[in-house]
Image: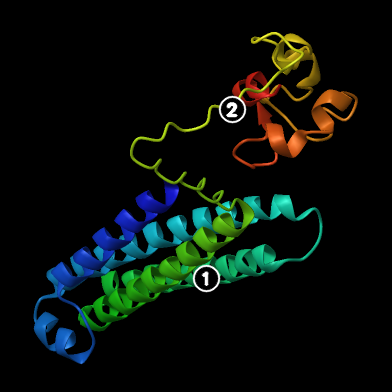
Amino acid sequence: MKSTIHSTRTLLAVALLAALGIAGPAAAQRTQGEPVKSKIQAEAAADVASEQAEAARASAQTARDATGVSGGVYTTINQQADAANKAANDAVNAAHDARSAQTAAEGSANPRQGAVEASEAANAATNANLKAQVAADTAVQQAYPQPAPAPVAPAAAYGVQPKQEVHATSSPPNSTLANKVDFDSLDANRDGSLSRTEVSSETMISADFNKIDANHDGRISKSELAGGK
């Protein structure tokens, strides 16, 4: 969801920059003799740059959160987090440049150059934000890989009834771990989920932690616990 929001912001930023019509020397010619318009363009470009920097920082935080599954070991997830952090820093620096260009444009009698520089800085911030998004998405995918799809059973031959398998169990149908342990007492930090540390005293859970953790996010929710036999 976050990635979608950030991507939408980036597309809007690109569209806004295109609508502003500022890009290099040609833009300087267009803005010549239009100081008020140039100041407005500089301000709009600086706003775009700030929004892109904010989105890049959010992507970098998402990537850093994903490194939590590394267990202190430097992995490719950490590499992606480093790339996202660098891109976020680049976006922030570009946003600062855009604001400086806006200030120069507002304080100048001929602000066209400031408008051009603000637009170029906004483009740089947008590109850096895109890099941060890609790195963050990659980090999350590596940290929480999607389980392989279940194999599809072959179709039964015409006229042949498939063999029915019967599995015996020594537990009642509704016998789940949720009925055997006190979830709330184990949830020490009250975040609504159980970590490996919080269930270390419950061997029934810790022994099958990975099986119970259906979405493999490193934590067990109440619904996942209810599904653990």
Q: Which mark is residue 165?
A: 2
Vertical arrangement, residue 102 with respect to residue 146, above or below: below
Mark 2 and mark 1 in contact? Answer it, CB < 8 Å.
Answer: no
Mark 2 vs 1, N-terminal side: 1
Q: Whole-percent x and y of residue 182?
A: 77, 12
**For this rendering, which residue is in front, 136 or 76?**
76
Vertical arrangement, residue 151 with respect to residue 52, above or below: above
Vertical arrangement, residue 158 with respect to residue 109, above or below: above
Q: Which residue is located at x 47 percent, y 66 percent?
A: 134
Q: Whole-percent x and y of residue 141?
A: 55, 57
Numbered disc in front, either 2 or 1: 2
Q: Residue furthest bottom?
A: 25
Label 2 crowd bin: few (<14), some (14–19), many (20+), radius 10 Å: few
Quadrant housing residue 34: bottom left
Label 1 crowd bin: few (<14), some (14–19), many (20+), radius 10 Å: many
Helix, strand or loop under label 1: helix
Quadrant including the N terminus:
top left
Quadrant including the C terminus:
top right
Q: Whole-percent x and y of residue 133?
A: 46, 62
Helix, strand or loop under label 2: loop
Q: Which residue is located at x 29 percent, y 78 percent?
A: 114
Q: Which residue is located at x 81 percent, y 61 percent?
A: 73
Give left or right: position of 189 versus 222.
right
Give left or right: position of 84 versus 50.
right
**For this rendering, which residue is in front, 100 or 5?**
5
Residue 168 can be seen in this image: yes
- Mark 1 sits on what residue? 87
- In the image, what residue type sits under mark 1? Ala
CA separation in Å, label 2 and label 1: 55 Å
Colour treatment of the image: rainbow
Q: How many marks?
A: 2
